């Protein structure tokens, strides 16, 4: 009889709270469609982890085995990068390579947040892991957090993906605050010509070599991303490209989400640090957006052909959500203002910028 009711007798209030949090994440994934591919597995995994005496966790539990196999080894985030690389078409960026600069400018929030986190009492490596939330790149956040602050991994991963889903809510007020209506109505030209296939094939190889030589700590991150893009662009691996974009990403995302949840135990998650991490993550996103917009305004001081400052906000890695947000804002100001392609070119540059920023953090703090 005691064995039958052992789960009830072992129930603690922290577990009840975490189960409610898991249900909230499931609700946000299903009802609000906030990053459902990851928040739903994390939410359900949180429930599995916090059921008293759960057989899903522990030394021989399946969630612990998945965590050790995919997160501890850093394999799951890297496999997802292959799929992301296969999804991204760098053609808009190759037509205007200077837009890659915005991918660097929009990483401002990472370093601002790193400083803020240090001032709030986190050690330097923890602060670096928290700052990477500003990369707006879930796999990079998980990769760096696993390396530097595994105890903060649950909060950092949930914050990263939650704020990525909230880009349409976070970015518009920041953009409007930093721009005038006249600036938001600026039209931008776009070269509609195609890029030679040889350039598309050389690009991922060249980026890997350049980034790897300059920032060796980024080789795994940028290398797997660019390998996925090479599969896409080489033209002889169409089947593998489709598999990387669909089956690989879907399967690994399930394992990634549910294994991260194995660390979301009440005692570990329900701490003041968790609230601080969520606040700092918001700071990172705000300053990333501001960095890109202000960089565009700075360039406009020296350019005859002006850049619409809103597109600078797309330098974060939330692809293609940020590009759509900026395009829609431009349409509201002027129905004949089509900013989608310039915004996309900066957005894909932001993906590269976020990965290199992750490598920089690993190099500087490792």
Image: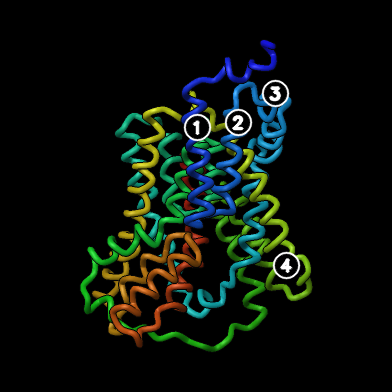
> In this rendering, would 262 be left or right of 121?
right
Q: How far apart are marks 3 and 4 (CA)?
A: 36 Å
Q: Give x and y (percent) for residue 273.
A: 39, 31
Residue 18: image tag? 1
Q: Which residue is drawn at 50% across and 67% down?
A: 320
The residues bearing labels 3 and 2 have C-alpha atoms spaced at a distance of 13 Å
Q: Residue 110: image x %, image y %?
A: 39, 49
Marks 4 and 2, Cα distance to the nearest angstrom?
Answer: 33 Å
Find numbered disc 1 in the image and state the secondary structure of the residue it sits on.
Answer: helix
For disc 2, the marked residue is 49
Decide which of tag 3 and tag 2 comes sooner along the chain: 2
Q: Which mark is residue 247?
A: none
Residue 242 — which label? 4
Q: State the CA–CA distance, disc 2 to disc 1.
A: 9 Å
Q: How far apart are marks 3 and 1 (CA)?
A: 21 Å
Dot 3 alpha-carbon crowd within 10 angstroms: few under 14, some 14 to 19, many 20 or more = few
Residue 24 in sight from this viewpoint = yes
- Tell me which label, 3 or 1, sits earlier in the chain: 1
Q: Which residue carries the number 3 mark? A: 59
Residue 171 vertical position relative to residue 55 in the rendered view, above or below: below
Q: How crowded is mark 2: few (under 14 residues within 10 Å), some or many (20 or more)?
A: many
**Nearest to N terminus: mark 3 or mark 4:** 3
Determine whether the residue tagged by mark 3 lies in a helix, strand or loop.
Answer: loop
| Residue at point 48%, 43% (across, down) | 24
Determine whether label 3 and label 1 are within 8 Å by CB.
no
Q: Nearer the viewer, mark 1 or mark 4?
A: 1
Vertical position of residue 269 compared to residue 361: above or below:
above
């Amino acid at each position: 009889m005691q064995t039958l009711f052992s789960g009830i007798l072992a129930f603690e209030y922290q577990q009840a709270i975490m189960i409610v949090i898991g249900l909230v994440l499931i609700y946000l994934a299903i009802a609000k469609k906030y990053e459902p591919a990851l928040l739903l597995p994390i939410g359900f995994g949180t429930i599995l982890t916090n059921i008293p005496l759960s057989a899903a966790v522990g030394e021989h539990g399946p969630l612990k085995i998945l965590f050790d196999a995919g997160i501890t080894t850093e394999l799951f985030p890297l496999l997802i990068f292959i799929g992301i690389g296969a999804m991204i078409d760098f053609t808009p960026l190759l037509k205007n390579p200077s837009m890659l600069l915005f991918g660097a400018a929009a990483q401002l929030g990472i370093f601002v947040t790193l400083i803020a986190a240090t001032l709030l009492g986190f050690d330097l490596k923890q602060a670096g892991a928290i700052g990477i939330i500003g990369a707006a790149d879930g796999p990079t956040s998980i990769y760096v957090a696993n390396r530097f602050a595994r105890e903060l991994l649950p909060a950092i991963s949930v914050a990263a993906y939650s704020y990525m889903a909230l880009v349409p809510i976070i970015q518009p007020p920041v953009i409007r605050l930093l721009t005038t209506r006249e600036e938001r109505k600026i039209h931008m030209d776009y070269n509609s010509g195609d890029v030679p296939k040889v350039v598309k094939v050389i690009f991922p190889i060249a980026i890997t070599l350049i980034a790897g030589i300059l920032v060796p700590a980024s080789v795994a991150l940028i290398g797997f991303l660019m390998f996925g893009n090479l599969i896409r662009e080489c033209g002889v691996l169409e089947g593998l490209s489709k598999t990387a974009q669909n089956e690989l990403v879907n399967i690994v995302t399930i394992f990634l989400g549910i294994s991260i949840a194995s660390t979301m135990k009440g005692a570990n998650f329900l701490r003041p640090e968790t609230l601080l991490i969520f606040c700092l993550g918001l700071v990172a996103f705000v300053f990333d957006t501001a960095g890109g917009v202000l960089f565009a305004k700075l360039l406009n001081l020296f350019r005859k052909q002006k850049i619409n400052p809103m597109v600078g906000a797309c330098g974060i890695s939330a692809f293609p959500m940020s590009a759509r947000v900026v395009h829609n804002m431009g349409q509201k100001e002027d129905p004949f203002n089509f900013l989608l392609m310039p915004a996309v070119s900066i957005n894909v540059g932001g993906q590269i910028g976020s990965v290199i920023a992750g490598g920089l953090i690993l190099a500087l703090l490792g």
